[in-house]
Image (cartoon, rainbow, N blue to C red):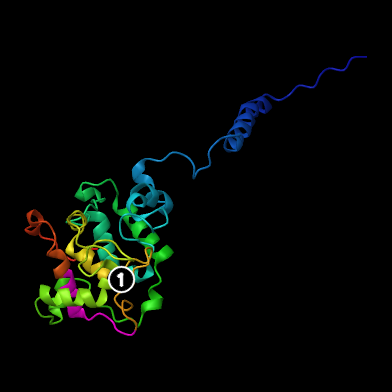
């Protein structure tokens, strides 16, 4: 005896497409080769990952890990303790006049948004800064303007020559043209690429990635004085090519 096939209510059929849709869509993100949310393409202005931003915008000059690049190392806790967060942000946003450091901020003609610049500044400080190690450090004035505000006398190139021979000649040679441990610091090509503030910063914090000592360590037990720092920078800058001497290099505090 044949039994009639039970009828399936029509509303059951209406759920079949819905169920199939749920199954298919829920499995899309697990398809082989499909990028994760983090890996998916984003417009350049939406990238806020520090590693990606640094690699694309900074590593070419400052080194892949913030060291051993053509420009000053950013992976240097002493330097990051000397400069303020505001100065670091300004240097990234507006560039550094008198040097090859470009402006990255969109308002200055660059390609980075305010949020991206914030990500770079916070990443540099959190990864490479150790400000707590320098809470009691007495830093020299960052800029010549800061030194003047603290009552420093006008710079003197002759005093600077004496300071150079005292603190620097053992590495860079008696006349500044290079020595056993350092290259020429009066090479016109070099001086054309750096500002007076860049020279001053290097005299103060050295180059940790190249073994250059800071202002405390050129001579054991004898720190460079604030006036000696300003004077030696003036002596170095006097070797800059004449066509560049008229260009302002210390008009604003910079990196």
User: Where, by quadrant of the figure, is residue 208 drawn?
Assistant: bottom left
Residue 27 forms part of the magenta stretch: no
Residue ID for mark 1:
205
Q: How many marks?
A: 1
The boundaries of the magenta stretch are 221-233
Q: Which one is nearer the viewer's eye here, 146 or 193?
A: 193
- The quadrant the N terminus occupies is top right
Residue placed furthest toward the bottom:
221
Q: Secondary structure at mark 1?
A: helix
Is 224 one of the magenta-colored residues?
Answer: yes
Q: Where residue 36 sits in the image (x, y, percent)?
A: 53, 42
Tell me: 41 left or right of 69: right
- Residue 80 lies, in percent from the top left, at 33, 68
- Pointer 1 local density, CA inside 10 Å: few below 14, some 14–19, many at least 20: many
Q: Tell me the chief SS of the magenta region.
A: helix
Residue 217, compared with residue 86, is above or below; it is: below
Residue 254 shows up from this direction: no
* Residue 46 shows in the view: yes
Which residue is pictured at 28% across the width and 78% down the height?
139
- Which of the 4 image quarters holds residue 143? bottom left
Of the pair 188 and 193, the residue shown nearer to us = 188
């Amino acid at each position: 005896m044949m039994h009639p096939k039970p009828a399936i209510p029509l509303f059951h059929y209406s759920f079949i497409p819905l169920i199939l849709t749920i199954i298919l869509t829920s499995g899309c993100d697990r398809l082989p080769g499909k990028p994760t949310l983090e890996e998916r393409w984003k417009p350049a202005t939406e990238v806020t990952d520090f590693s990606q931003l640094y690699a694309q915008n900074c590593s070419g000059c400052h080194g892949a890990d913030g060291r051993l690049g053509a420009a000053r190392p950013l992976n240097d806790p002493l330097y990051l303790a000397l400069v303020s967060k505001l100065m670091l942000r300004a240097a990234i946003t507006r560039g550094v006049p008198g040097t090859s450091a470009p402006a990255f901020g969109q308002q200055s003609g660059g390609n980075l948004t305010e949020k991206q610049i914030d990500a770079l500044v916070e990443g540099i400080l959190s990864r490479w800064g150790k400000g707590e190690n320098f809470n009691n450090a007495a830093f020299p004035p960052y800029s010549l303007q800061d030194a003047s505000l603290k009552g420093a006398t006008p710079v003197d190139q002759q005093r600077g020559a004496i300071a150079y021979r005292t603190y620097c000649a053992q590495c860079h040679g008696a006349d500044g043209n290079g020595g056993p441990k350092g290259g020429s610091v009066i090479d016109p090509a070099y001086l054309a690429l750096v500002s007076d503030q860049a020279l001053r910063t290097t005299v103060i914090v050295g180059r940790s990635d190249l073994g250059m000592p800071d202002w405390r360590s050129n001579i054991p037990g004898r720190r460079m004085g604030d006036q000696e720092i300003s004077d030696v920078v003036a002596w170095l800058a006097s070797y800059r090519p004449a066509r560049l001497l008229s260009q302002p290099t210390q008009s604003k505090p910079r990196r």
